[in-house]
């Protein structure tokens, strides 16, 4: 049986793979596991992004939470890091976000945070899964045996009367989250013109007033969600429109968020993209210069560009590398107390203020670093030389993911290519933890050649597994 939880919660096509029935079960057993043996009635904070399926899944999820005897506090549309922040502020036992992040509208996801705002470790997710699978097994085993009372099963027994959970509206959640951001970062943005792309997602209400409150002049796109246009040709995965807007409006900087607001990428005044690696390099250097970078260490994943290694070496900054997924970055940071970490995709974690990637927070921190330097972003970005990189994906069914990674033809071909690249390039083939994809990433000095290599590897996967 395949695992429900990926690297960032449970995801799938809404109402097909991620069904209301599954959402109910996740709510019920998630509340049961995360609330534990509390002396009070458990409290679960719930938020979502703007996609059309969120209302359906929220209803099912909240029903499951309440059926476990927990109270659900509904925040509505709010960035994922808002739930991670407020779960502790509101003294809740857990938080849940309904979102598929950067994925298109037909997908959705459910991800949990514990009472301290941290994503769940594998063993807690496994416990929730075990309860869900146990219930399915019980139902399957007795569905034709009418003499068995399902309520006698301890796994299915539910509270009654006053012990049933309530649903409450957390009406001030978005404003409370914005206040926490303003309390975290102090910066004067008067005279700065900023272009925003909110991806028609969870940041569409909060982004403009947040940066305006710092004194910036703000123009924005991606602020008209209709349930179907989240991440559609906009946001941190589609930066073309923001690049055009920055140049057209003569902005100093552009900031793009993804659908749930935990990622941020930037654009300089010339309309050139500044990715997560460069953002982390600039912020790390500023934090090092102001004695805020713990042990002069930056935590990144194996996907980070080789140019970041060169930058770190030249600036006496250590890199600690993890496998792909911001949860693994956070685990490394929490274990050793490191202050900054993240991913090339724009997940940036500033542990002093947040327990997860936070697009708004990292945008403010980047702006603070730029202001501290006294130089424009287009000049600062040259501190790191980004080596050419090609990243392509091949769609495969989830059950084929592990098979692809050990395919003899693919392994032999990639090994030969790595010998050609030598120490001036690298190849990384990995299964996506959030989508039915195999990703192939190649770095090297010759963009044309590594593009050919990448396509050759993708062709093998497509020929054999698609």
Image: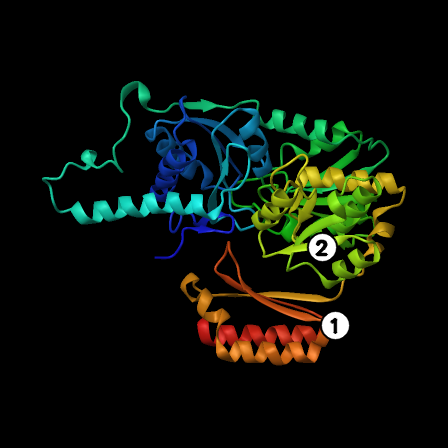
Above-or-below relation of 339 to 104: above
The residue depicted at 83 percent of the width and 58 percent of the height is 314
Q: Is residue 245 visible?
A: no
State left or right for residue 169 relative to residue 242.
Answer: left
What x and y, as percent, mark residue 215? 80, 29
Colour scheme of the picture:
rainbow
Please state if 307 lies on the left or on the right of 173 as rendered.
right
Residue 63 spot, x, y in % from top left: 36, 32
On the question of residue 207 being in view, the answer is yes
Element on which disc 2 rests: strand
Q: The N terminus appears in which quarter of the rendering? A: bottom left
In the displayed structure image, the side of residue 189 where residue 91 appears, left or right: left
Residue 257 image offset from top left, x and y in percent: 65, 44
Rendered location of residue 119, percent (x, y) = 53, 42
Kindly identify which residue carries mark 1.
424
Cβ–Cβ below 8 Å for labels 2 and 1? no
Of all residues shown, which one is farthest toward the right? 374
The structure residue drawn at horizontal position 49% and vertical position 27%, both measured from the top left corner, is 92
383 and 268: which one is in front? 383
Labels 2 and 1: the sequence-earlier one: 2
Which of the 4 image quadrants contains residue 305? bottom right
Identify the image quadrant of the C terminus. Answer: bottom left
How many numbered callouts?
A: 2
Tell me: residue 17, above or below residue 24: below
Quarter of image, res 173: top right
Find disc 2 in the rendering and name its residue.
319
In this rendering, the label closer to the viewer, 2 or 1: 2
How far is the residue under mark 2 from the one under mark 1? 18 Å
Q: Residues within 10 Å of mark 2 (few under 14, many from 20)?
A: some
Q: Secondary structure at mark 1?
A: helix
């Amino acid at each position: 049986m395949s695992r429900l939880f990926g690297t960032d919660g449970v995801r799938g096509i809404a109402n097909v793979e991620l069904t209301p029935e599954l959402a109910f079960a996740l709510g019920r057993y998630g509340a049961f596991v995360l609330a534990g043996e509390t002396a009070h009635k458990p409290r679960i904070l719930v938020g979502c992004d703007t996609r059309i399926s969120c209302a359906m899944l929220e209803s099912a999820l909240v029903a499951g939470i309440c059926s476990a005897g927990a109270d659900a506090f509904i925040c509505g549309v709010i960035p994922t890091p808002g739930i991670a922040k407020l779960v502790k502020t509101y003294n809740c036992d857990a938080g849940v976000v309904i979102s598929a992040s950067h994925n298109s509208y037909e997908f959705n996801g459910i991800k949990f945070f514990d009472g301290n705002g941290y994503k769940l470790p594998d063993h807690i997710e496994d416990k929730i899964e075990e309860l869900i699978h146990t219930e399915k097994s019980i139902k399957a085993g007795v569905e034709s045996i009418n003499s068995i009372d399902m309520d006698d099963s301890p796994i299915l027994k539910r509270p009654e009367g006053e012990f049933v959970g309530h649903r409450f509206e957390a009406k001030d959640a978005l404003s409370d989250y914005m206040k926490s951001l303003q309390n975290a970062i102090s910066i004067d943005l008067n005279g700065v013109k900023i272009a925003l792309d909110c991806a028609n997602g969870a940041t569409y209400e909060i982004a403009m007033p947040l940066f305006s409150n710092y004194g910036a002049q703000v123009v924005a796109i991606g602020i008209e969600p209709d349930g179907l246009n989240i991440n559609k040709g906009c946001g941190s995965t589609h930066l073309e429109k923001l690049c055009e807007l920055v140049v057209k409006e003569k902005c100093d900087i552009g900031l793009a968020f993804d659908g749930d607001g935990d990622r941020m990428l930037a654009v300089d005044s010339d309309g050139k993209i500044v990715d997560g690696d460069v953002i982390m390099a600039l912020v790390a250097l500023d934090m090092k210069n102001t004695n805020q970078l713990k042990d002069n260490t930056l935590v990144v994943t194996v996907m980070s560009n080789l140019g970041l290694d060169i930058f770190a070496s030249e600036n006496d900054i250590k890199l600690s590398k993890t496998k792909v997924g911001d949860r693994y970055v956070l685990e490394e940071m929490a274990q050793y107390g490191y202050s900054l970490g993240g991913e090339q995709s724009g997940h940036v974690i500033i542990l002093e203020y947040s327990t997860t990637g936070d697009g708004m927070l990292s945008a403010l921190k980047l702006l603070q670093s730029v202001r501290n330097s006294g130089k424009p972003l287009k000049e600062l970005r040259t501190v790191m030389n980004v080596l050419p990189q090609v990243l392509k994906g091949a769609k495969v069914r989830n059950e084929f993911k592990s098979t692809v990674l050990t395919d003899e033809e693919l392994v032999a071909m990639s090994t030969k290519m790595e010998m050609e690249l030598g120490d001036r390039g690298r190849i990384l083939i990995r299964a996506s933890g959030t989508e039915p994809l195999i990703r192939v990433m190649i770095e090297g000095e010759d963009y044309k050649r590594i593009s050919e290599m990448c396509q050759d590897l993708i062709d093998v996967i497509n020929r054999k597994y698609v």
